[in-house]
Image: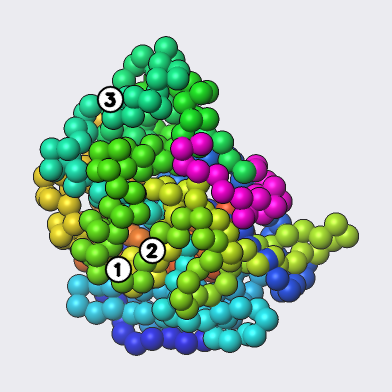
Amino acid sequence: MRVRAGLSATVATAVVLGLTAAAAPALASGSAPAPAAVAAGSRSEPDAKALRAAIAGLPDADAKALRAAIAGLPDADATAALVRVRGKKTSWHGSSGVRDLVSGREANPEGRFRAGSTTKVVTAAVVLQLAAEGRVDLGAPVQRYLPELFGANADAFRKPISVRQLLNHSSGLQPGRSLGKTFEELYANRFVTLTPQEVAVSSIAKGPAHDPGVKQEYLGINYTLLGLLIEKVTGHSYEQEATRRVLKRAGMRHSSFPGTDPRIHGPHNRGYQAVEEPGGGTRLVDVTEWNQRDRMAGGDMISTTADLERLTVALFRGRIVPKPQLEEMFTVPKGIEGATMSAGLTRFEAPDGRVVWLKTGGRHGYNSILAATRNLDTVLVYSVNSTDAKGQDMNPVAQRIVGAAIGDPRG
């Protein structure tokens, strides 16, 4: 295990990971979890109760505890973990595990990974920039910007869906087409290209699930449409605009959008998924190569923990989005019971009043988070190569990281 230097001040954040899928030799046969079914087009946000409990009573981060939190990898829950903790004056970087199960080489602490839905933070930033430039009206209906898309089912979408409602997941849209509902189905289709346009068309054809602005429902389709909106308004690809407007400004030199390319280029730690064997026990399937084209603006980005930290700091300091529009990222909609999601982020409040803004990400083989208090007194970024990265429970490795950084959430 490699652990890098430094020790952070108090870290006020925690996350319940949604786990992802992975493939290769068996690891601790019989002890790894079985793959969970993957809901098409959707993924739950972290459990609020668990987060509030974890954020409460925050002690100073402890380097020894952080080392212990990621020690012993690979195990049945994860094959690698990369962690960055940042406080007011100090920081702590650590890594553990292996690059791959075949060679057993030490995990690369600068390794790239699929950042999943943390991509939505980048997408939201692009849309808010366009709003600042007067090219997008956040209160205007998305039907105005994408008339061809909605025209095929115009009667079902007579009620306008605002751009802001896409940003905060209160649009009422239904999930679009996917390439499977279970890990086995998705894995079999991992090299198939499903375009964002196909996903969007299939969603609109279903009609709305409910009226816009009634409730929040976390769905990737909202950000698929935002990606298409960005392309329509700018005349450029989503990848070009996101790279120029966000990645370059934040100094995210090792982040990219692979499109239909299933590979992770550059140094990376491979991802795995635990799969049940017919006769009992489990094996790990390597899921590193995977075409993510259908995710686009909702989850296509490849990044590093250092780049996600750069993004968090630059964004929260107002270097990416002008401050008037940046307020959208720290504002949840009024009038919606239980609303926690803003433009690109999720708000959690601890019993002591401490507020953490975060975004999780999960693609098969990889889970990640970027989280911080608004004043950046506390920043936590990590990537965990979970062996069930689309599961519903908090990954035990992630739970140990949270406990070491902010104190045991179980008291």
Inspect the magenta stretch and tell me whether residue 184 lies in it: yes
Q: Residues within 10 Å of mark 3 (few under 14, many from 20)?
A: some
Q: Relative to 69, say whether 34 is above or below.
A: above
* Residue in the picture at 19% in, 32% down: 137
The answer to if 353 sits in the magenta stretch is no
Closest to the observer, 279 or 157: 157
Q: Which residue corresponds to the image point at 31% horizontal and 20% vertical from the top-left?
A: 160
| Residue 330 horizontal/vertical position (percent) | 23, 46
Q: Circle 3 sits on which residue? A: 144
**Residue type indicated by callout 3:** Arg
Residue 274 in which image quadrant? bottom right
Proximity of marks 3 and 1: CB atoms separated by less than 8 Å: no
Mark 3 to mark 1 CA distance (whole Å): 33 Å
- Tell me the CA gap for discs 3 and 2: 30 Å
Residue carrying label 2: 256
Name the secondary structure under disc 3: helix
Say if 12 sits above or below 8 in the image.
above
- Which mark is first along the chain, 1 or 3? 3
Residue at x-position 88% and y-position 60%: 279
The disc at residue 252 is: 1
Of labels 3 and 2, earlier in sequence is: 3
Identify the amino acid type marked 2.
Ser
Return the x and y of residue 99 as percentages of the image width and height. Answer: 56, 79
Q: Which residues make up the magenta segment?
A: 180-198
